[in-house]
Amino acid sequence: MSHVLQRRNQVLNHLFGEHHGWLVDRLRARMGCRHDAADMAAETFAQIVALPDAQAIREPRALLTTIAKRLMFASWRRRDLERAYLESLAAEPEQFESSPEDRYLVMEALLEVDQLLHNLSSKARAAFLYSQLEGWTYARIGAELGVSAPRVHQYVVQGLKAICAVVR
Amino acid sequence: MSELPAALEQAIEWHARQASGQFTEREHQAFERWLAADHAHATAWNSLRSRLDQTFAQLSGSRARQVLNTGTSRRHLLRGALVVGGCALSARLVTWPGMPLDTLAADFSTGVAQRETLLLADGSSLTLNAESAVNIDFSNDMRTVRLLRGSLMAQVERRDRPFQVICHDAIAQLNAGHCVMTQYQDHAEFWLKTGTAQLRSRQHQVLALTAGQGARADSQGVHPLPARATDPAAWVRGLLEVNDQSLGQVIERLRPYRRGILQISDAAASLRISGVFSLDNSDQALAALKDILPLRIDRYWGLWTRIDRA
């Protein structure tokens, strides 16, 4: 076995043996569901396995906690958005006639945009979305959010930068 | 936020000005001059437009805006919020019209890559792993499940009569609780997750188990197993959890999820491994194993997979 692979496998063995049970217990306490906790722990370890230099990890429990928290937050955010989208569809029953494929594509697009904008403040995010999705003038957005038009301009620039910042 | 190319920053500035609702004719002329001034400007402008078109192609109007402005709810921070969804198992009710609820005799089996949950008339449930078979026999004084092959997880409700799970070499008896049993070629493993149980060998040797304990049963009798870090019922969720086991053992557990022949050389079988793998996507699991271990995996005619040390 090549030395690098051998070392890597030893490290993963050690991490898994020492910390897997601990992580599942912690997630279970937090999430209240054994199955969700186990899935989240599995996903967390999958990300650790994917790290190029797992042997460099010094504080495994801190790292596991960080990754698990991020995954947990992402899954909650996803559920919130899905619920909001379905509620908005239910409010207009005729919209339910759109096909499941269409709804899936819309949901994926919503999640992608949500992810791209996640570093923006809530006002910047709202301003950018009013402009981009509803075509409101900056004067109207400013009145709605209680800020000046030049401030709205800055918010829109922040939003556009966020959309462009990630290389596809 | 990372640094963007200067031309793209300018394109963004122009786009934001155009969207203001107060874009004057003079500004428009200035924009045209900027666009014509440098090839890089036109490229940046086009890439910004196509980026926006791509990103927002599926989205328009107030619905998308409202959804995206949804705040992340606090309620998730409360313990137990995630119990909804995710935990549900598809299940089949083992009863039919006119059937007496107290007694039942039936055989069930699952095929390759199939799992099934059976809801029994007494409120207990059985989940069968892929390639597993059971024989259910409920009489007036005993509830009996015989595991013929494969694995089962039983969630036992307390009733007036005990519940027993039988493998080739032993009988596990419990009044209530939650257990997992796997029948291998020459032995069986039993793990108790909740409740208490008694394991009795053919030689009438008795082993008492409490939650979290496991035992092995073979023709020699029953023996306690050392505690393990992984969940013996991970397969219920379609996962294979492995902690420092041989690749040979891992492949054995993957086998019920794979059609065709899965062959492994002795040299590869003795490699040790830990990790979490997908049972429901065994190709992915094999690819993950190859990432961690020095393996060569050959496939022939889609039916025959051979694993060897690279």
Image (cartoon, coloured by chain):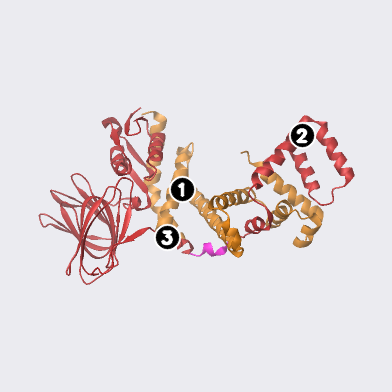
Chain colours: A orange, B red
In the figure, residue B91 lies in which quadrant?
Answer: bottom left
Disc 3 to disc 1, how far (Cα)? 16 Å
Instruction: Tell which tag, 3 or 1, sits nearer the viewer.
Output: 3
Q: Residue B42 bears which disc, if any?
A: 2
- Image point (57%, 50%), residue name: A102
- Image location (x, y in percent) of residue A11: 40, 39
Tag 2 subunit: B
Q: Chain of mark 1?
A: A
Does dot 2 land on a helix, a strand or a loop? helix
Mark 3 — residue? A33
**From which residue to which does the magenta span run?**
B73-79
Q: Amino acid at mark 1?
A: Thr
Element on which disc 3 rests: loop
Can you see residue B170? yes
Asked if residue B74 lies in the magenta stretch, the reply is yes
Give the x, y percent position of residue B171. Answer: 17, 57
Measure the alpha-carbon separation of dots 2 and 1: 43 Å
Q: Quadrant of the C terminus of chain B?
A: top left
Q: Residue at position x 22%, y 46% from top?
A: B184
Q: Which residue is mark 1?
A: A44
